[in-house]
Amino acid sequence: MQQTFYDAVGGAETFHKLTARFYEEVAKDEVVRPLYPEADLGPAERRMRMFLEQYWGGPHTYSEERGHPRLRMRHNPFVIGPIERDAWLRCMHVAIASIDEKTLSPVHRKQLIDYMEMAAASMVNSAI
Ligand code: HEM
């Protein structure tokens, strides 16, 4: 069987690191942080981690707990314009950059960045 992206980049440990670093940035970000309804970012971090693990070929815990991702619909309550998208992407770029070269090869890094840029663009629901 072909190895999944999830396995190729170090599995659970890498996705843990990625989402932990991402939410560390979100916590400090003046644009993105206020969008989160809860004081504790822990549950949001866990949902994001489960989603990404599932998307990249890891365990399907996200859908077992939450059903179909329907991410665009789940983001409808939040106004996401170009400013929010760029702030979100900045946090994600920092998180991806924090994963070392040995774990995340240049090819896999590009795949991850391309996906995040595409996904963030598709989440935009406001012109401003
Ligand atoms: C949930 C913001 C893009 C994946 C959320 C939440 C906010 C948010 C405020 C709610 C968290 C909560 O209820 O505690 C944003 C902003 C984005 C963005 C401002 C800018 C583009 C993305 C992208 C992805 C993503 C590109 C995936 C690659 C998720 C997931 C959840 C979530 C998986 C949890 C959904 C669930 O409730 O199961 N996001 N998000 N988000 N976001 Fe985003």
Image: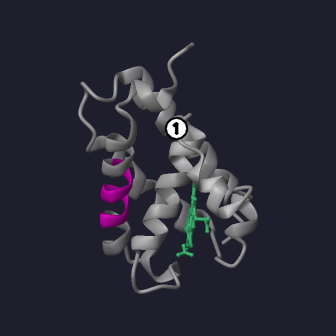
- Please state the horizontal and vertical placement of residue 80, each as a whole percent of the image: 63, 69
Magenta residues, as a range?
Answer: 18-24
Q: Quadrant of the N terminus?
A: top right
Q: Is residue 101 left or right of residue 34?
A: left
Quadrant the C terminus occupies = bottom right
Instruction: Look at the picture and state if 108 lies above or below 44.
Output: above
Q: Tell me if residue 55 is in the magenta stretch.
A: no
Which quarter of the picture shows residue 42? bottom left
Nearer to us in this view, 70 or 107: 70
Q: Residue at x 40, y 30 (%)?
A: 109
- Going by the picture, which residue comes out furthest to the top? 1
- Say few, some or many: other residues with alpha carbon within 10 Å of mark 1 (under 14 / 14 to 19 / 20 or more): some
Q: Is residue 127 visible?
A: no
Tell me, yes or no, if residue 76 can be seen here. yes
20 part of magenta stretch: yes
42 left or right of 44? left
Q: Secondary structure at mark 1?
A: loop
Q: Is residue 14 above or below residue 41?
A: above
* Residue highlighted by disc 1: 58
Quarter, ligand 1: bottom right
Rendering coords of residue 72 (x, y %) = 72, 61
Give the residue type that dot 1 points to: Gly
Q: Is mark 1 within 8 Å of ligand 1?
A: no
